[in-house]
Amino acid sequence: MKQEKIISAYNEARERYAEFGVDTDAALAALKGVSISLHCWQTDDVTGFEAAAGQLTGGIQVTGNYPGKARNIDEVRADIEKVKTLVPGRHRLSLHATYGDFGGKKVDRDEIGPEHFQSWIDWARANDMKLDFNSTSFSHPLSGSLTLSNPDDAVRNFWIGHTVRSRRIADEIGRQLGDKVCHNIWIHDGSKDITVNRYLYRSILEESLDRIFAEKCSHVKDAVECKLFGTGLESFTVGSHEFYMCYAMKHGIMSTLDLGHFHPTEEVADKISSLLLFAPEILLHVSRPVRWDSDHVVILNDSVAMLAQEIVWAGALGRVNVGLDYFDGSINRIGAYVIGIRATQKAFLMALLSPLEKLRAYEDTGKYFQRLALLEENKALPWNAVYDYFCLTEGVPAGEDYIPEVEKYETEVTSKRL
């Protein structure tokens, strides 16, 4: 009965959108091609699988202690496999270097290799997923306040070695899975208080990056990620937006824009068209900051909606790599995954369903009242009926039907993780 209602609602929505010149079938076909890179660290609170995994450092903080956190690599994979059954489309998985299959042995960050991620490659192939990768500079005895920008050669060389190895791992993943891997570099480097020699630290970081990228990795899409500030390092961030944007443009690699890494009054969406004029591709980390970079679960808010609009309206779906980046330990972690993925998809669907030709015609002829009025009316068009139909055709729960599925998994699986 519900299936019939979803189909009926979709047919009505298709007719309504057709009145505005919008093809809902074409929008769904485009949405199916939007592959979101899921973040493996939501299910285990960024713990990873290092033998001596300790407290999170480097400005990384997960709040909450909801029961059911994944405790090992098998549980992380089981959780992600469950998530896949609750969201439509085909998606990727983003790994951090600390999530290797180390077999309980101590493997330091500058010793990791493709062999520690072979089981992930095999798992991804078996589950019809592609992978992305991130070097990991935080939560290590040598993390401190400075890693790749550290004047101490021994410390800096350690992190250069780690990042070089991370890119090699990403390259091997891409080679085996037949798809380029986004490798993202984010470091927390900075200072808690006033810094006198900012130029020095940034020049050291530039030199470190030059050494890292000297080795060509043909199966990798390289990216560098900026941040406004880090917790405990509030006064100076070495890898600022301006630094990484300039470095990325100079060397032909991607800038990574994280929604939580800018001033609260900035909208990341406004940066996309400018970057795309000068860069072939960019990488996004979709998050939800609340007063600071607190990595709340992504919801369908104005920032995410504008982000998707800017990408779709610029015709840049094929040039923007979209990943999620949040970690919430205060609620059911699988539910947190599903909410965030669906919210991001809904934002893209709403953008794809926009009456763009009519809006552009109004704008081109100076009819700004009409443009604003249509933008407002567009918000109330039945996009949710189209999304429900997408879920139905993809064989996943539509509407709120995923809630009891998450509850069932909690009863049968995660609640037993004592």
Image (tube, helix red, strand yellow):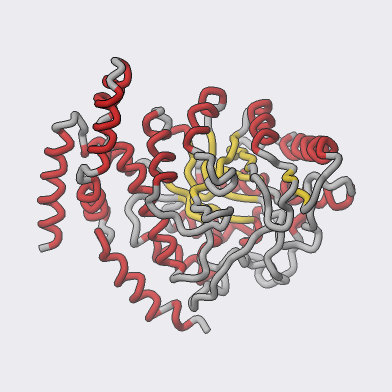
Q: Residue at x 28, y 27 (%)?
A: 371
Q: Residue furthest top?
A: 365
Q: Residue at x 55, y 49 (%)?
A: 260
Judge left or right: residue 284 versus residue 368.
right
Judge left or right: residue 383 versus residue 335.
left
Quadrant in which the N terminus appears: bottom left
Judge left or right: residue 276 versus residue 361.
right
- Position of residue 131 relative to residue 379, above or below, is below
At which x and y percent is residue 186? 66, 47
Q: Residue at x 14, y 59 (%)?
A: 3
Question: How many numbered callouts?
Answer: 0
At which x and y percent is residue 269? 47, 37
Q: Residue at x 64, y 40 (%)?
A: 224
Q: Is residue 174 visible?
A: no
Judge left or right: residue 341 versus residue 265.
left
- Position of residue 88 relative to residue 418, above or below, is above
- Position of residue 334 relative to residue 115, above or below, is below
Q: Is residue 114 visible?
A: yes
Front residue of 162 and 389: 389
Front residue of 115 and 112: 112
At which x and y percent is residue 21? 19, 29
- Position of residue 34 relative to residue 143, above or below, is above
Residue 263 lies in quadrant: top right
At which x and y percent is residue 384? 24, 50
